[in-house]
Image (spheres, rainbow, N blue to C red):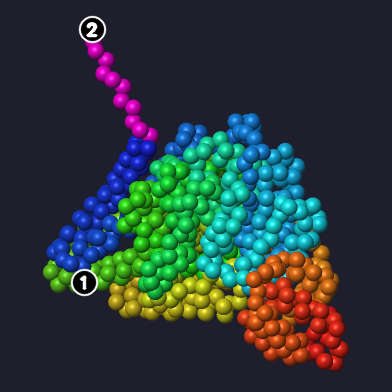
């Protein structure tokens, strides 16, 4: 009788890790082999070794991007990844949230209060139509430091409470000092209120999430206690410019395959983007406190990009970080122009480069370290690309001189064209295949199985051609700008996290575009002239790069063109929300301080939000009263901004100023305060 061999079952984690990275290394190794043959045609020296090393890193990174797309396509053909995180409404229907309080937090920093509070109103009202709505509380966490926006936020908050009857379920808190930015704001919430909630849904100021999505996320967390963070895939909405529309369509056409492929190998160590996600609060509070980095210029101090590190720390604690590709009602805005997008990239660049401190942490798992490394190299690769192009150009000129001296004209033409150029073209085609093949396959998928986003296959093809051309010419300029960002960071130039511009009513000026890309333009002109004078083949071969640098101001200018209509797809419902009518008198930057201190309505709103200090000394009170007297007589300019904030954050000082204002003759007070 034949004895059957035992069936071998592979661990899916191990199998996926080896199959994916095996494919990445296979593709990368093939490219390296061709390039090595190309370099060893003649003597292999130090510059060849440097180029081979640089190419190996760049091609490995390129192979990774292509492979996650290809693995995403394979999963799509199979009907989806069987191990993917699914939020099935029928499966989660029986889960109750009565004993699972959820905090929905919205950190804001000098944002447009109208837009922020409109979104909160819609989310809260929609949530109230569901049975489990009482488990959700909303927190507006303000770091605003502009007085007029601060007053607008307080006014909108009280309007919001009155319109939604959200007393006891919607909260507003403003920090006096916005230490550590958004991460410090979230950390402050966790310290003060985190123990009262089991889960926390984090939204950005520009985020929106359907009520049904919030419920599904909370129920999924309740059903699977090993999940630490569950990240959604927010769709770009409220597209106002051609630049935004371009990236919205790109996201819909391409991103699902890249994200699905990344989830294939990451599994329970997926990406966390810091917003539009739900977090299990207890392990997050216990294990995800961000350390302060050693002092090392812009690479030290507070961590700017906190999400990747928080994801790694919660994985270290034994919890999963999952990414759901389900079509949930999760949305975010995108920078309206290329200039704003690059400003955001500069912040992300510094934040990602700071993460190198964590690569040596033994406690972090392999997946987390790879994610950190990929984040660092997403910007560092631009430096390597520029170096690779520069040294390759020098090597080509040196080889050309060698061939011309070593062979007669006929032999030179045969050897140079049949071997040297042939290998160069092979490398070029292989590189372009890795860049464009995933996009072409995604286009074919969309044509065969069209989605509802594009009206027709012709519209899909039309967008694909436009996107390919524009992104082809944007890429070299983005590379050049990223090199500048990396150098700024390494030289210690810290980025200040400012309020993001989210709206635009007209094109950016060409002057602004040219000022931003002035160095890029001049460098493009210089490279084109040098190549034209040195070698015409190189002039044409590198034309996509120097031409991109030269037209970068024009690209930025034309892609900032406002759209005729922004009511398309996911934009339609959200942009149709009407903002609250602005209370009279209108709050402006000039009159905000006066309204807070003198207007009965705004004064009462603000006073309600300021807590009483029971341990305040008599000396402090007298100091504040003196400041109030000085400002009442001399106006806001008579004291410093810091001293104004001392008054605005002190209940006794506010009462003293308001009372004295209404008891003082008009002729004895500053002209600034004489009329409301």
* Sequence-first tag of 2 and 1: 2
Look at the numbered disc 2 and give the secondary structure of its residue. Answer: loop
Residue at which label 1 appears = 398
**Residue plotted at (74% across, 81% down):** 590
Instruction: Check if residue 4 falls in the magenta segment.
Output: yes
**Is the residue marked by circle 2 packed among few (<14), some (14-19), or many (20+) residues within 10 Å?**
few
Q: Are marks 2 and 1 in contact (CB under 8 Å)?
A: no
Whether residue 11 is in magenta: the answer is: yes
Instruction: Locate residue 468, reporting x and y percent.
Output: 49, 57
Q: Quadrant of residue 487?
A: bottom left
Q: Is residue 541 visible?
A: no
Q: Nearer the viewer, mark 2 or mark 1?
A: 2
Location of residue 544 in the rendering, given as x and y in whole percent from the top left corner: 41, 66
User: From the image, which quarter does the C terminus lie in?
Assistant: bottom right
* Vertical relation: 390 (above or below) 590: above
Q: Is residue 222 visible?
A: yes
Q: 110 left or right of 584?
A: left
For the point 14% across and 67% down, the residue is: 407
On the rendered structure, is 411 left or right of 81? left
Quarter of the figure that contains the N terminus: top left
Main structural element of the magenta stretch: helix, strand or loop?
loop
Residue at 80% from the left image edge and 85% from the top image edge = 673
Q: Secondary structure at mark 1?
A: helix
- The span from disc 2 to disc 1 (Cα, nearest Å) is 72 Å
> 552 or 646: nearer the eye?
646
The residue located at (34%, 27%) in the rendering is 9
Question: What residue occupies the far top of the structure in this picture?
Answer: 1
Residues drawn in magenta: 1-12
Q: Is residue 268 above or below residue 312?
A: above
In the rendered structure, find residue 1 and report the number of the disc placed on it.
2
Rendered image quadrant of residue 408: bottom left
């Amino acid at each position: 009788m034949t004895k059957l061999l035992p069936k071998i079952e592979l661990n899916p984690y191990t199998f996926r890790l080896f199959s994916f990275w095996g494919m990445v290394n296979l593709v990368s190794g093939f490219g390296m082999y061709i390039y090595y043959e190309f370099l060893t045609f003649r003597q292999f020296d130090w510059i060849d070794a440097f180029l081979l090393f640089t190419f190996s890193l760049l091609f490995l990174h390129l192979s990774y991007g292509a492979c996650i797309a290809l693995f995403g396509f394979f999963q799509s053909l199979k009907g989806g990844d069987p191990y993917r995180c699914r939020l099935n409404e029928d499966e989660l229907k029986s889960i109750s949230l009565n004993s699972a309080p959820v905090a929905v937090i919205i950190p804001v920093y000098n944002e447009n209060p109208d837009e922020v509070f409109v979104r909160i109103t819609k989310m809260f009202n929609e949530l109230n139509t569901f049975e489990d709505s009482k488990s959700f509380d909303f927190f507006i966490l303000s770091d605003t430091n502009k007085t007029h926006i601060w007053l607008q936020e307080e006014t909108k908050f009280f309007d919001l409470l009155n319109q939604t009857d959200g007393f006891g379920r919607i909260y507003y808190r403003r920090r006096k000092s916005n230490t550590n930015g958004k991460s410090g704001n979230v950390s402050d919430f966790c310290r003060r209120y985190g123990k009262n909630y089991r889960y926390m849904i984090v939204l950005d100021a520009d985020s929106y999430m359907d009520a049904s999505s919030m419920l599904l996320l909370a129920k999924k967390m309740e059903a699977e206690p090993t999940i630490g963070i569950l990240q959604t895939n927010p769709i770009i909405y409220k597209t106002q410019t051609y630049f935004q529309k371009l990236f919205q369509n790109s996201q819909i056409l391409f991103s699902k395959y890249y994200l699905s492929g990344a989830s294939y190998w990451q599994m329970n160590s997926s990406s966390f983007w810091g917003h539009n996600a739900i977090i299990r609060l207890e392990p997050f509070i216990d294990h995800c406190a961000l350390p302060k980095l050693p002092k090392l210029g812009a690479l030290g101090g507070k961590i700017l990009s906190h999400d990747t590190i928080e994801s790694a720390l919660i994985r270290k604690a034994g919890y999963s970080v999952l990414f759901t590709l389900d079509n949930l009602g999760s949305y975010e805005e995108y920078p309206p122009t290329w200039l704003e997008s690059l400003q955001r990239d500069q912040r992300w660049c510094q934040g990602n480069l700071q993460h190198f401190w964590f690569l040596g942490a033994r406690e972090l798992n392999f997946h987390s370290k790879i994610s950190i490394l990929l984040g660092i190299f997403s910007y560092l690769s631009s430096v390597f690309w520029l170096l690779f192009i520069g040294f390759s150009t020098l090597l080509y000129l040196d080889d050309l001189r060698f061939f011309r001296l070593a062979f007669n004209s006929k032999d030179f033409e045969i050897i140079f064209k049949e071997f040297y150029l042939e290998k160069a073209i092979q490398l070029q085609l292989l590189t372009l295949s890795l860049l464009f093949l995933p996009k072409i396959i995604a286009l074919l998928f969309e044509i065969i199985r069209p989605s509802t986003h594009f009206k027709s296959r012709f519209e899909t093809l039309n967008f694909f051609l436009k996107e390919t051309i524009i992104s082809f010419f944007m890429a070299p300029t983005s590379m050049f700008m990223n090199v500048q960002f990396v150098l700024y960071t390494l030289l210690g130039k810290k980025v200040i996290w400012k309020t993001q511009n989210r709206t635009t009513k007209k094109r950016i000026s060409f002057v602004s575009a040219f000022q931003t890309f002035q160095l890029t333009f001049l460098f493009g002109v210089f490279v084109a002239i040098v190549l034209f004078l040195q070698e015409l083949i190189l002039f044409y071969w590198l034309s996509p790069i120097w031409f991109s640098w030269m037209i970068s101001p024009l690209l930025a200018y034309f892609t900032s063109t406002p759209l005729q209509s922004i009511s398309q797809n996911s934009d339609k419902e959200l942009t149709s929300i009407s903002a609250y009518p602005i209370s009279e008198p209108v709050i402006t930057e000039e009159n905000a301080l006066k309204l807070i201190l003198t207007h009965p309505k705004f004064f009462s709103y603000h006073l309600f939000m300021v807590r009483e200090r029971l341990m305040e000394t008599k000396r402090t009170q007298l100091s504040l009263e003196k400041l109030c007297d000085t400002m009442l007589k001399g106006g806001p300019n008579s004291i410093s901004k810091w001293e104004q904030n001392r008054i605005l954050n002190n209940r006794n000082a506010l009462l003293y100023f308001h009372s004295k204002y209404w008891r003082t003759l008009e002729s004895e007070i500053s002209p600034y305060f004489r009329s409301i």
